[in-house]
Amino acid sequence: MTQELAAYLTSQALTTALVVSAPMLIAGMVVGIAISIFQAVTQINEMTLSFVPKIVVTALALLLFMQWMAAKLADFMHYIFELIPTLAS
């Protein structure tokens, strides 16, 4: 395995991880910003008000995007497994 291939595979793995985690992170961020604005407007400083909805929305995003995320990860692993025989030569 060359250094270029190792760098490319590392880049692809990090990109895949970022793409797969993006729906949950974006959903949590949007809800967090909305709750922060609500707390600023109403001056309610309840700590659980910010954590519970973010956890619920993140779990819902996980359930909604789980099939897509699994397909992306399976495609990446299929690519890696196809690449293994070419590394020996």
Image (tube, grey):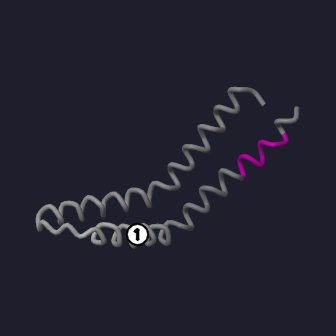
Q: Residue at 30%, 71% (x, y): give it.
A: 48
Residue numbers of the magenta segment: 78-85
Q: Residue at 83%, 37% (x, y): give it.
A: 86
**Residue 51 % position (x, y):** 34, 68
The residue identified by callout 1 is: 55
Nearest the viewer among 45 and 89 is 45
Q: Secondary structure at mark 1?
A: helix
Which quarter of the rendered picture does the N terminus lie within? top right
Is 54 inside the magenta-drawn segment? Answer: no
Does residue 87 appear left or right of residue 56 in this picture? Answer: right
**Residue 13 % position (x, y):** 61, 44
Nearest the viewer among 52 and 19 is 52
Does residue 75 appear left or right of residue 25 in this picture? Answer: right
Q: Is residue 30 above or below residue 9?
A: below
- Which image quadrant is residue 7 in? top right
Q: Is residue 6 above or below residue 53?
A: above
Does residue 28 appear left or right of residue 85 in this picture? Answer: left
Amino acid type indicated by mark 1 = Ile
The residue sitting at the right extreme is 89
Which quarter of the rendered picture does the C terminus lie within? top right
**Residue 79 % position (x, y):** 71, 47
